Amino acid sequence: MKSGIEANCSGLGWFPARPSFRLAGTVRIRPMQSFRHFLLFAALFATPVFAAEPSPLGIWRTIDDETHEVKALVEIDEQHGVLSGHIVKLFRHPGEIQDPVCKACEGERHDQRVIGMTILWNFRRDDDVWDGGEILDPEKGKIYRCKLHPIDGGARLEVRGFIGISLLGRTQVWERQPP
């Protein structure tokens, strides 16, 4: 009469050379081979989890708070671990100036074209939020402190602009531009 698990430990002394186990009527299983398969499986499928972490890098559609229409496309990129973003396209109505300049901006941005203007700068990663940066509202010429937080697996981006502390501000949600 055989038991449910039959051990085949061929080798010398206390340490078998290649232990294997056979379930009655099934395939032989070698523990080290199974462990190697597990490591291979874990390496193949764990890597995309780390690589698929949401990021604010890419092109985003900004949405108007009142009309809920797309206002602009902003491209966010990274240089030496610091994020910045510039306007790549504006969506204007036929009666509006199609290539406006920033009349309300101060300093070097005054009377500069809005298309191509850097409106986000100095963002550094802090866990799943990019913080410490600033954002320019080209319509008002105002600069606010800002935080960026990818949500919905990176499909949307919470952009929180504020004065002083984060509680005193407002949040816009931008949508990732499809490729």
Image: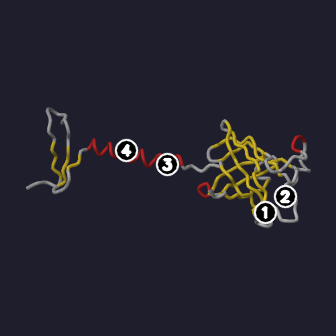
Q: Residue 48 — which label?
A: 3
Label 2 and label 3: CA atoms lie apart by 42 Å
Q: Residue 98 — which label?
A: 2
- Whether residue 65 sits left or right of residue 125 in the image: it is right
Disc nearer the start of the sequence (3/4): 4
Query: What's the residue at 76%, 52% (across, down)?
Result: 167
Three-letter residue code for mark 3: Pro
Quadrant in which the N terminus appears: bottom left
**Nearest-to-viewer mark from 2 and 3:** 2
Label 3 and label 4: CA atoms lie apart by 14 Å
Three-letter residue code for mark 1: Asp
Disc nearer the start of the sequence (3/1): 3
Disc nearer the start of the sequence (2/1): 1
Q: Residue 40 — which label?
A: 4
Label 4 and label 2: CA atoms lie apart by 55 Å
Asked if the residue at tag 1 contacts the one at tag 3, i.e. Cβ–Cβ closer than 8 Å, the answer is no
Q: Secondary structure at mark 2?
A: loop
Label 2 and label 1: CA atoms lie apart by 20 Å
Residue 150 to residue 93: above or below:
above
Residue 84 to residue 11: above or below:
below
Asked if the residue at tag 1 contacts the one at tag 2, i.e. Cβ–Cβ closer than 8 Å, the answer is no
Q: How is the image coloured?
A: secondary structure
Query: What's the residue at 16%, 55% (across, down)?
Result: 24
Q: Which residue position is annotated with label 1?
A: 65
Three-letter residue code for mark 4: Leu
Q: Residue 179 sits in which quadrant? A: bottom right
